[in-house]
Image: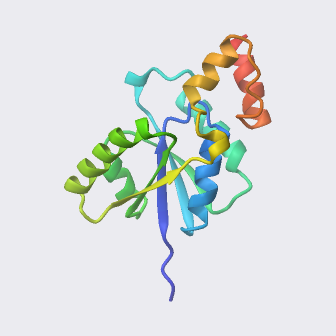
Amino acid sequence: MSMQTTAIYPGTFDPVTCGHSDVCERALSMFDHVVIGVADNPQKEPFFSLQERIDMLNIVFGDNERVSVRPFSGLLIDFARDCDSTIIIRGLRAISDFEYEVQLAGMNRSLAPSIETVFLTAAVKYAFVSSSLVREIARLNGDVSEFIHPEIHQRLTQKLN
């Protein structure tokens, strides 16, 4: 009997970018299943609603039976336990992400020693891509089509108009 490993990949995904997809695809090369945890954090005042973000992630990953999308609020370690996972995937774009992410990982480890954080660096071509930057460039009528899925691009454009 082989044990199936499930990793969780939490984030706001506001909207999901090609960088997010890249990290998820690479996580799938290491783990059997990835649960994308969509953070429901009203303090962050997301541009897209929770349901819109879930819908967009399902568009991007809908064909992959090894990926599931679930909303979560509260502690990440509680979400990990709900998903029967001991692995948290975090994408790193730049050194600037590292300090904060290491702090989060350390806190999570002290709260739940059995849960490990795995850092995956973004592919070089997406190292500078963030959801907030994509939104800002799109708001100023810049072309963000190479950084987001075509359907996500369409939804972003509609919402901005």
- In the rendered view, does 122 fall on the left or right side of 148? left
Residue 13 image-quadrant placement: top right
Q: How is the image coloured?
A: rainbow
Q: Nearer the viewer, residue 157 or 117?
A: 117
The correct choice, above or below, for 140 with respect to 58 in the image is: above
* Residue found at the very far left of the displayed protein: 110
Q: Position of residue 93 (x, y in %)?
A: 52, 41
Q: Position of residue 46 (x, y in %)?
A: 50, 23
Q: Position of residue 20 (x, y in %)?
A: 60, 44
Q: Residue at x 43, y 40 (%)?
A: 95
- Can residue 54 be seen here? yes
Q: Residue at x 63, y 45 (%)?
A: 124
Q: Nearer the viewer, residue 104 or 40?
A: 104
Residue 59 image-quadrant placement: top right
The correct choice, above or below, for 86 with respect to 48 in the image is: below
- In the rendered view, does 59 fall on the left or right side of 108? right
- Can residue 48 be seen here? no
Quadrant of the snapshot with the C terminus = top right
* Residue found at the very far bottom of the displayed protein: 1
Q: Residue at x 66, y 18 (%)?
A: 137
Q: Position of residue 154 (x, y in %)?
A: 78, 26
The correct choice, above or below, for 63 with respect to 47 in the image is: below
